[in-house]
Amino acid sequence: MSDSYALPKGGASLILSFRVQNKVVLIVGSGILAASRAFAALEADSSVVILAKGGIEAACDEIQWRVRQRQIQFVDWEDLPSSSASNNDADRLEAFLQATPGIALGVITDTLSTSQRRDHASAQEIYRVFHARNIPVNTTDIAEFCDFTFTSSHRFEHHETGEKTPLQIGVTTNGQGCRLAARLRREIVSKLSREVGAAVEKVGQLRGIAKDGSGAEAHVEEDEEICEESAVLTPNRPVPSRSNSESASESRTRRIKWVAQISEYWPISKLASMSETDMQEVFADSNPHHPSAASEAQSPSLHFGTFSKAGRILLVGSGPGHPSLLTIATHTALTQLADLVLSDKLVPAAVLSLIPKHVEVRIARKFPGNAEGAQIEMMEAAITAAKKGLTVVRLKQGDPVVYGRAGEEVLYFRSHGFEPVVIPGVSSALAAPTFAGIPVTQRGVAESLIVCTGVGRKGKEVQLPGYERGRTVVILMGVARIQQVINALVEDSSSEPNGGQGRRDGRGYPLNTPIAIIERASMPDQRVISSTLKDIVRALESSGEQRPPGMMIIGWAVLALHGQGDMGVLDKDGESQDAARVKRWLGGDDACGWKVREGLETGWEDL
């Protein structure tokens, strides 16, 4: 184990979302801010009590209206009994809290500039009363009397009905600029799809189906979807394939995982437009040998009319993700030729959005435990459409022949009378390292390159290449099994069955070998986690949930362009300098053993 982890840096907040349904929020003050807090509490299904001086006549118009509508309750300080002769606000509040059970939060708003403004000493006294009863408090403009703060928040509406949706976002600057927080919140909202609120509603319905097979509102705990036995958080973590013998619990777990896959990969617009039929089809049996599947494949599709032209199939690579990296041939296929697009789940929304609205787009249901059936399902759909005279674009991420199963599809389509046109794409195996500032070959550092996969057919382990100092290894589709991959690379082959022949071909890797995990390469939320083989698993676990798709780049090229560059790896005495170059790369003795870079380098915004 390493003796260092990431050092915490104070100044942040622990951001939580409170459930206050059927509980009481007590708001002190009756001005405009109190009305805003009351509205937020009402939308959270809380009961609201306003405690203020001057009577209801001194309250703002909104407070008076909500009291008349019986949405909130108003209590005047002067009407409260006192528990002592001093008769101050703290004593009155103490008596009120004692007589009013179920208060979940206290919000003090009359410390703002109002006709009934509360001074610092009084705010401190009533804060202490709340605190003594373990009631969290927010005191406006007095940070030391705040157990929690409010974010600058926005609740999304349905883009068609205008109804409020469950989706909310909040921004906080931790007291460093409330006005700026509001601006940032507006900018974030403006950049999100109009359909995002509807998408959340639809995914909620889908989770309900995943849980109990009905369309009822989902009550699946969030942890069931994102937490995986204290392991690295990833929607690609393997799950068993469906079988006739799986239990109800196993089925539920698999279906919840599939919802996570859809949430991660499907475009927001498609999520927002899901019908009940679409939702049921997500969980339908994908086994092409199943009788029901066979009959469905033979039945005429409502999506296709009668065409006299000959159908054809284009097997197309979409590149690593950034729309500007599409080839002209791929762009033409998507925007001018396609009648039907059958897309892999990893193709990002930015590429799919280029497809004209009248063209049907289907996304592969290649979820963990279902990949083989979904693969055949897509190939059969392509044949069915091509027989009806349609031009089918089978859209894959990266390059179709670089772990894109293009060979299988070419042979399948050929056996059914169609010779597909294969259109190359920019492979993420080469593009992703470039986006991360890593040259996969570099004089003085890396003289050769190997591209391999981290998982074999049907999830089997593969034989990984052994260590060669002047070689860069790119491992695709292995991040979800990263511990297995690292073990195979570094373990002493003499301790392995048959000398480790099934896990690694060649000598083991030094623990200080640089490695980078590149996630969502070329996309705005790209992330690069860099470390050594010794610490990369902890680095990934410490960086939060994964962002598939991801890949691993292993070798000394990972640090070659850091700072002023390091081109002496292959020098005669280069190996003796490894400890120093790794320490320099990762930030010295005080560093945690890894580093994380977010987003694209400057310059890609306009491309």
Image (spheres, helix red, strand yellow):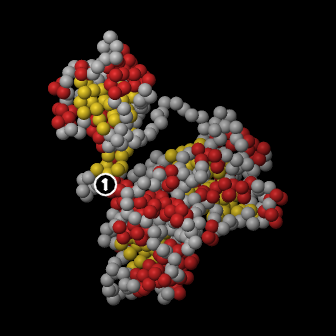
How far across and how far down the image is residue 303, in percent? 34, 78
What's under tag 1, amino acid-wise? Arg
Density class for disc 1 (Cα within 10 Å; few <14, some 14-19, many ≥20) is: some
How far across and how far down the image is residue 444, in percent? 70, 52
Residue 16 lies left or right of residue 476; in this view the side is: left
Residue at the far right in the pictured view: 494
What SS does tag 1 mark? loop
How far across and how far down the image is residue 397, in percent? 50, 65
Q: Dot 1 corresponds to which residue?
A: 194
**Image point (38%, 18%), residue name:** 125
**Image point (25%, 27%), residue name:** 75
**Image point (31%, 49%), residue name:** 156
Residue 41 visible within the image: yes
**Image point (54%, 32%), residue name:** 9
Q: Nearer the viewer, residue 528 or 73?
A: 73
Q: Quadrant of residue 118?
A: top left
